[in-house]
Amino acid sequence: MTFQIDSGIDLAGQEVGAVNSADTVAKSDKVNRDDRKTVGEINHPDPRMTCRDVNVWYGDKHAIIDVNLDIGKNEVIAMIGPSGCGKSTFLRCLNRMNDTIDGCRVTGEMMMDGNNIYGKGMDVVLLRAQVGMVFQKPNPFPKSIFENVAYGPRIHGLAANKTDIEEIVVTSLQRAGLWDEVKDYLEEPGTGLSGGQQQRLCIARAIAVNPEVVLMDEPCSALDPIATAKIEELIDELREHYTIAIVTHSMQQAARVSQRTAYFHLGDLIEVGSTDQVFTNPKHQLTEDYITGRFG
Amino acid sequence: MSATALLFTLALLGVFSYWLGRKRSFAVVDGQAWKLHSLPSYYGFYTAIWCGVPALLITGLWLFFEDLIITHLVVGQLPADVQSLSPSRLNLVVNDIRNMVSGNIVSVDVDPTMQAAADHYIQLQDISKAALTVLVLIMVIMGGLYALRSIRKDKQARNAVERVVKVFLIASSTIAIFTTVGIVFSVLFEAIRFFETVPITSFLFGLEWSPQMAIREDQVGSSGAFGAVPLFAGTMLISFIAMVVAVPIGLMSAIYLSEYANKKVRAVAKPLLEILAGIPTVVYGFFAALTVAPFIRDTIGSTGLDVSSESALAAGLVMGIMIIPFVSSLSDDVINAVPQAMRDGSEGLGATKSETIKKVIIPAALPGIVGGILLAVSRAIGETMIVVMAAGLSANLTANPLEAVTTVTVQIVTLLVGDQEFDSPKTLAAFALGLLLFVVTLILNIIALHVVRKYREQYE
């Protein structure tokens, strides 16, 4: 099977089933690699993290293929693509959360402050303090709201005394836009909050350790539209202090919150560019098919 | 027909009526089964239930009362002088008749009246059996016919069957509950008889345990002392040593197995650990008595301390090993049940594995872990064999683990082993000990349940 993108045949019309079928992944080595080269500008003038030739395997499955991408300072970069395209895998590489998965192997360079985060001397604990993560499903600990936020600062020794820790908790909750709702209930369990509040609590928990980069793996997919709107607003505000990489299934969300967008397809990074350009004028046929809703 | 043959016939008829009911349900809708209210098999079960259950109930009641009624009739036929005997003497006569019926050796010479009574007994038994067979068959046929006749298109057979199933389930749980209640009451009444001879205060607070009672008035040195304190102190001491061994080892191996070990190690190590629970306690017992106890005596004894050859330490250590799997297996399960999202959340913040375990996983799994420990404690308190062999029988009131002690369960065993008269305080003391042990375990359970519940309210 070959893709004949350049010949002008309507790919979506003829190949939709094949593109989405699982066996395409196994055969992906056979597709014309030239069609899978990244288009658009992968570099950023002021990069916070630089990824070069990143490959990821889960056992025998090649999940990420030769991905090159810069993540710029104080930008929101959105990663979009159909399910199983490797966008979450790529995101989880950025703070080595994939280490906990059996059989996961990563090659290539991911540089941050001149260090390869997969290099030998890298301390995962420090990396994760710098690169925080918010997950798809809100996962507050079964502790009080206060303890949830204080957890990170405590394990990293960021606070010398009780006053410091209280200050960190208050600031983090304020930045996460949750303070006004929970200030009188700090001793209540975090699991008792609503879904949207729980997710903002998880964001507060992540920013309490003062990270530079925050990774968000579909942070709104378990939330209702109102809670989603709040989180999106929050992401926009957080950009002032943090670099944010967000994986999302919602193209509207990507368009609303991000400055740059990266489109992944079956383990390849297909297109990177400013969000405006990717959504209004995609350069690659696969990107266009995806954002116009012809598949995915 | 004998009872077994009757039951067998009933079972066959039940299967047959199932088939009939199912067939009948097809017939009433001309084979268009989708028009029926319930699936055809429900009509089968419905018919089978109507055939079997009333007949079974009748059989049960009949067998229960048969003996009573026959005996009454036979006694009524006996000569007046025998009938006027005291109830216990009369009982003996009835026993003799029964023995003659079943062909056993009888305690008196066979006289004609007795022989006649025995013949009468056999005759009545035969009549009863025949009557039962006929009655049961009639019940089966009537029940079956009633059920078959009531099968219509809109007959709610499924609902009827579900109701019967529910009643069965209720009956089963009732049996379990009533057995428990029955055991508690029988222990309670025997214990009350014990407290009639020995005051309850001297049992609960007495510091000396020496249950030998004088059989004759002038016997020396066997006054009998029933102070339960040394026994409970011994039980607590040994259980404590066992828990000191089992809780840390069990918990840590559970953490290793669930959080650190890879799949291959886990697949081998977990069943191996659980084998510990399958070793018979008597094997642990002689391991404790023949290997561990001498080892402790030799090693600690060489430091100049006084160690008895049967020690609480030996029994406690081995018991601790025995209950490791209870702690580790249950803890492992609850730790595994903590969602992966909790681990991700903690590790995503830069917590190390051990920090995650200490601060997130263990607190989240605590109710289950406490449950596992509790099960281990009740196992330790109830354990008998190891203590009999390794800790001795002498009821010393001591906190020194190097001395011989004894436990409640061991004393219950020694009180009831061998030929005993069942109304002496010595024997009845066993029931009192059992009752007290039951109460203590119950209180422990309630306390632990409250601890767990309090914790849960805080975190959920």
Image (tube, coloured by chain):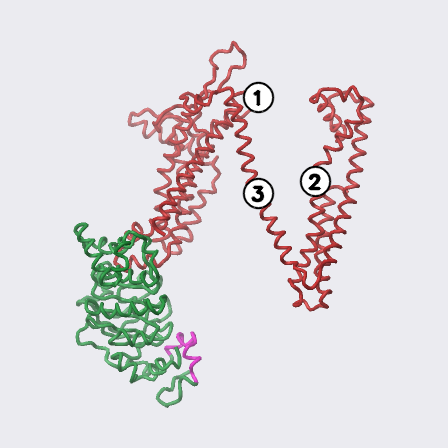
Chain colours: A green, B red
Identify the residue position indicated by label 2 in the image: B61
- Residues B270 and B372: in front is B372
Taking A73 as reference, is A273 above or below it? below
Residue type pointed to by label 1: Glu
> Do tags 3 and 2 sit on the same chain?
yes
Q: Amino acid at mark 2?
A: Leu
Magenta stretch holds residue A117: no
Q: Earlier in the sequence, mark 3 or mark 2?
A: 2
Q: Estimate how packed mark 1 is, as few (under 14), some (14 to 19) or many (20 or more) residues with alpha carbons within 10 Å.
A: few
At mark 1, the secondary structure is loop
* Quarter of the view holding residue B298: top left
**Residue B271, relative to residue A220: is it above or below?**
above
Identify the magenta region: A14-29
At which x and y percent is residue B249? Answer: 35, 43
Q: Position of residue B447 (x, y in %)?
A: 40, 39
Q: Which residue is mark 3?
A: B174
Q: Secondary structure at mark 2?
A: helix
Q: Label for residue B160?
A: none
Query: Which of the 4 image quadrants contains residue B190?
Result: top right
| Figure check: A156 above or below B443 | below
